[in-house]
């Protein structure tokens, strides 16, 4: 799967994932003003997402869909989530379901079946929320990861494991030094690298990736050197304060090794003064183009090709 993602990135010269973390509040007034029920909100969000996908699919390789923004609209929101995943895949985009799910044993297996594998009903198999990648929490250890690894192997899927997250307080736990000298995030990163050993593809990266925030460039640089076969999902660019110069350390000498998420900076671009007067899809397109150029310049300055 990661080979496919890399080839899609290379074809578009754009290591960007658009975060469809879509709240009703993010929609233009004309789309949200008549919404009075959860069902109304979910329908408007679905329409908004579909329009963005149609506009952006020619310039971005992937979308990341954060499930929490859909869960808060109840059953109708879950349907909007499922419809968005399906429409994005049908449109040729790589789909990352941002779930941060995990548990142990059979429960982890159920999560994996829902998003990566299959659910069987009297011999009939279904893929309820089919995704190419999901984000998972690896802090329960290997028995909480193995069911996901098994489905990745069986169905050619991928996961991104939380390693060094973009939030300001991540260091309270993740930067703690363990016995032996390594930090907690380095230790988890080493596990991620090991979990991906059997799925390393032709570009040198496995299907077991890591979430590494752009807001912590020093730690990201350590991880890039330490995890040569681990592909990074890089949150934190834009609204969270991460810059293209910060995240350049996440990429290898060929400009490979990561994909950068931007949610509000693209889907809420129509609210920004810079894109004032543009309809929401056109504003999102302009913001995505600006981000592509920003990352390209940063990688070029760092001497990394793309």
Image (tube, rainbow, N blue to C red):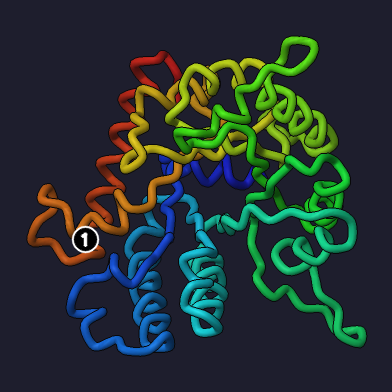
Give the residue drawn at x 83%, y 50%: 153
249 above or below 283?
above
253 above or below 131?
above
192 above or below 52?
above
Q: Is residue 10 visible?
A: no
Give the residue drawn at x 54%, y 36%: 165
* Mark 1 lies on residue: 282
Q: Position of residue 24 (x, y in %)?
A: 33, 72
Q: Quadrant of residue 298?
A: top left
Q: Is residue 56 visible?
A: yes
Q: Nearer the viewer, residue 46 or 184?
A: 184
Q: Position of residue 152 (x, y in %)?
A: 78, 52
Say whether residue 218 is left or right of residue 135: left
Give the residue drawn at x 66%, y 68%: 130
Quarter placement of the C terminus: top left
Q: Position of residue 16 (x, y in %)?
A: 43, 44
Q: Residue furthest left?
A: 277
Q: Residue furthest front?
A: 172
Q: Quadrant of residue 256?
A: top right
Q: Position of residue 289 (x, y in %)?
A: 28, 45
Q: Nearer the viewer, residue 139 or 70?
A: 139
Q: Nearer the viewer, residue 52 or 195?
A: 195
- Callout 1 secondary element: helix
126 above or below 176?
below
Say whether residue 198 is left or right of residue 237: right
Say whether residue 284 is left or right of residue 306: left
Say whether residue 193 is left or right of residue 169: right
Give the residue drawn at x 37%, y 89%: 37
């Amino acid at each position: 799967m990661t080979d496919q993602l890399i080839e899609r990135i290379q074809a578009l010269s754009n290591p960007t994932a658009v975060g469809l973390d879509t709240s009703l509040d993010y929609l233009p007034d004309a789309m949200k003003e008549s919404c009075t029920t959860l069902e109304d909100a979910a329908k408007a969000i679905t329409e908004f997402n579909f329009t963005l996908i149609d506009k952006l699919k020619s310039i971005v390789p992937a979308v990341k869909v954060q499930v929490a923004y859909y869960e808060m609209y109840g059953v109708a929101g879950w349907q909007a989530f499922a419809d968005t995943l399906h429409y994005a895949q049908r449109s040729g985009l790589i789909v990352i379901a941002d779930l941060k799910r995990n548990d142990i044993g059979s429960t982890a297996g159920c999560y994996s079946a829902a998003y990566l594998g299959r659910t069987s009903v009297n011999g009939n198999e279904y893929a309820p929320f089919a995704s190419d990648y999901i984000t998972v929490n690896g802090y329960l250890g290997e028995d909480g990861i193995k069911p996901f690894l098994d489905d990745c192997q069986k169905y050619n899927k991928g996961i991104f494991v939380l390693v060094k997250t973009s939030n300001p307080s991540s260091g309270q736990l993740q930067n703690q030094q363990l016995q032996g000298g390594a930090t907690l995030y380095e230790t988890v990163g080493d596990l991620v690298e090991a979990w991906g050993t059997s799925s390393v593809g032709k570009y040198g990266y496995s299907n077991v990736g890591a979430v590494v925030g752009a807001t912590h460039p020093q730690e990201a640089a350590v991880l890039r050197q330490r995890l040569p076969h681990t592909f990074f999902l890089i949150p934190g660019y834009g609204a969270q304060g991460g810059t293209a110069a910060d995240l350049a350390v996440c990429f290898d000498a060929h400009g490979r090794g990561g994909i950068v998420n931007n949610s509000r900076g693209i889907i809420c671009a129509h609210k920004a003064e810079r894109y004032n007067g543009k309809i929401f899809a056109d504003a999102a397109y302009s913001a995505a183009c600006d981000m592509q150029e920003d990352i390209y310049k940063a990688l070029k300055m760092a001497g990394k090709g793309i």
